[in-house]
Image: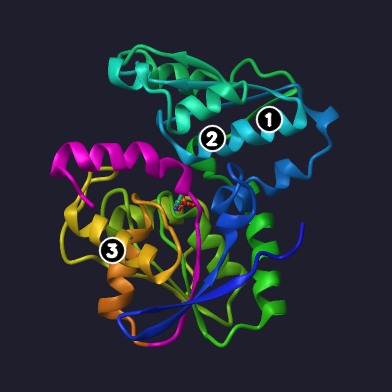
């Protein structure tokens, strides 16, 4: 794999650098590529089956499905029951992951937690479990590779930014790049919840800054200002995802003055189904 390129965009009169991890692969890109790096470089004979669980439109799910197809691994993915709307959808991450050969298993709401915690009990050595969103120590190596690429490309910036879900990416990137400031924003819950999630993996380094948005947002809900930010970025020349990127960009524009290298975290494949939800909620969004 060649290093992903760095592009420049002008936004509100400011120049930003973008590390184009979104261009790595149509499905296996962004921070999911980085987080799955250890598995991606594992010889295929090592496993027969990968298991994961979580959201029904998750970017991690799609990335794992693409990886398993490349590797010839069977992929079992557990979720809570689907809505009829999702079941009938022909586009979006779930539809794409199913086309890549993922086996999707729905678990009743009341059984879900217990079922997920029991998954590890009867594992054979040819089966591997990827925690929800890929939030585990195995993500560390891929982010060290990213840090090394950034050093080699030597961008004109002393700060990087990347949005957080579980916070795994921002945390390991900050640990691997102590000479840079790393900015992030929470997308699921607030700052404290994100800190807790990160601390479960490692103590928080001093160069990691969690920016708080002015307003509270619920994960994966459509917000007009997210759409406006998305549109502005698209007009500046790069498409970003609609779930994580908008609130970080808003915070960078409002709260950070220095030049930033934004690490594109991918997720653009989920936009089509998200845009359908936006036009349902806000009408025509041309
Ligand atoms: C998964 C994802 C994130 C969050 O990554 P974490 O390592 O869980 O913080 C951010 N952006 C996009 C586009 C993602 O798909």
- Point out the tag, 1 or 2, that comes first from the N-terminus: 2
Please give the residue where the numbered disc 1 appears in the rendered image: 68
| Residue depth check, mark 3 versus mark 2: number of the one nearer the observer | 3
10 Å crowding of disc 2: few (<14), some (14-19), many (20+): many
Instruction: Say which of 117 and 222 sits in front.
Output: 222
- Across and down, in percent, residue 51 comes to 59, 25
Give the residue drawn at x 58%, y 41%. Answer: 27
- Does residue 213 appear left or right of residue 246 in this picture? left
Give the residue drawn at x 63%, y 15%. Answer: 122
Please give the residue where the numbered disc 2 appears in the rendered image: 62
The residue carrying mark 3 has its beta carbon less than 8 Å from ligand 1 = no
Q: Quadrant of residue 91?
A: top left
Q: Is residue 20 visible?
A: yes
Instruction: Indicate whether residue 262 is drawn in magenta.
Output: yes
Instruction: Say which of 1 and 281 sits in front.
Output: 281
Read off the magenta span. Answer: 258-286
- Across and down, in percent, residue 220 comes to 29, 43
């Amino acid at each position: 794999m060649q290093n992903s390129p760095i592009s420049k965009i002008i936004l509100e009169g400011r120049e930003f650098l973008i590390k184009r991890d979104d261009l790595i692969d149509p499905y296996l890109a962004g921070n999911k590529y980085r987080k799955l790096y250890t598995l991606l470089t594992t010889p295929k004979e090592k496993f027969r089956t990968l298991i994961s669980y979580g959201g029904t439109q998750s970017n991690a799910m799609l990335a794992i499905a693409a990886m398993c197809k490349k590797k010839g691994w069977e992929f079992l993915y557990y979720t809570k029951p689907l809505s009829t709307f999702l079941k009938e959808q022909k586009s979006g991450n779930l539809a794409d992951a199913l086309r890549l050969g993922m086996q999707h298993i729905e678990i009743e709401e009341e059984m879900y937690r217990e079922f997920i915690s029991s998954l590890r009990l009867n594992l054979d050595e040819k089966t591997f479990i990827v925690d929800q969103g890929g939030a585990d120590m195995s993500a560390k190596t891929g982010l060290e590779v990213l840090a090394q690429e950034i050093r080699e490309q030597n961008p004109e910036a002393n700060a990087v930014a990347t949005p957080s879900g579980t916070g795994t990416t921002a945390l390991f990137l900050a640990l691997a790049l102590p000479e840079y400031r790393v900015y992030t924003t929470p997308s699921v819950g607030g700052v404290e919840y994100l800190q807790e999630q990160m601390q479960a993996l490692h103590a928080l380094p001093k160069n990691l800054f969690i920016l708080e948005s002015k307003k509270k947002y619920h994960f994966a809900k459509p917000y007009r200002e997210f759409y406006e930010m998305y549109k502005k970025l698209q007009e500046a020349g790069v498409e970003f995802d609609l779930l994580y990127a908008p609130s970080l960009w808003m915070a960078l524009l409002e709260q950070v003055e220095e030049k930033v290298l934004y690490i594109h975290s991918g997720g653009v494949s989920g936009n089509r189904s998200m845009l359908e939800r936006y036009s349902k909620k806000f009408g025509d969004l041309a």
